[in-house]
Amino acid sequence: MNKIIRKHYIFYGNVQGVGFRYRSYYEASRLGLSGWVRNLYNGTVEMEVQGEEEKIHALVWAIDQSRPIRIEGIDSEDIPLKKTEKDFKMLN
């Protein structure tokens, strides 16, 4: 079994008003990941995502391949798992 992790991300670039949250929701749901995504007031997008590490990498790759989304930078850190979380949500 692959390792289950939880990541916190901040995405920089052309990431608001381009379908980033919708693409994230679709791909995360398709991959069986849980967490959430939301726009921040400074023009970045924040995400927490939990699941198999390889599937999280696949999620970020799929978002980055979606035009007109253009990720120019990513801050990420490992954070504690949320054991009761079951699905992925778009916030705000």
Image (spheres, rainbow, N blue to C red):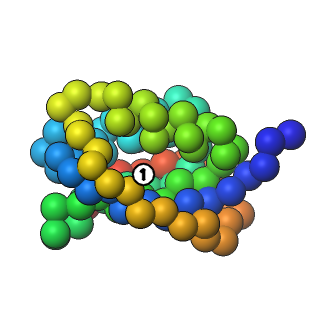
Q: Is residue 16 above or below residue 32?
A: below
Residue 29 in sight here: no
Q: Residue at x 35, y 36 (%)?
A: 64
Quarter location, residue 26: top left
- Tally the numbered discs: 1
Q: Residues within 10 Å of mark 1 (few under 14, many from 20)?
A: many
Q: Which residue is outermost to the front? A: 72
Q: Residue at x 60, y 54 (%)?
A: 50
The residue nearer to you, when weighing 13 against 16, is 13
Q: Which residue is outermost to the right? A: 1
The residue nearer to you, when weighing 41 against 58, is 58
Q: Quadrant for the C terminus, please.
A: bottom left
Residue 66 location (% of width, % of height): 30, 28
Question: In the shown orientation, is residue 54 left or right of residue 27?
Answer: right
Residue 83 in sight here: yes
Question: In the shown orientation, is residue 43 left or right of residue 47?
Answer: left
Q: Residue at x 23, y 61 (%)?
A: 44
The residue nearer to you, when weighing 29 against 57, is 57
Q: Quadrant for the N terminus, please.
A: top right
Residue 82 location (% of width, % of height): 65, 66
The residue nearer to you, when weighing 89 against 44, is 44
Q: Secondary structure at mark 1?
A: strand
Q: Check disc 1 and report the residue beneath it.
A: 89
Q: Which residue is outermost to the left? A: 17
Residue 13 location (% of width, % of height): 21, 51
Tell me which amino acid carries mark 1.
Lys
Q: Is residue 92 above or below residue 22?
A: below
Residue 84 location (% of width, % of height): 67, 62
Question: In the shown orientation, is residue 3 left or right of residue 65?
Answer: right
Q: Residue at x 16, y 69 (%)?
A: 42
Q: Is residue 31 above or below residue 3?
A: above
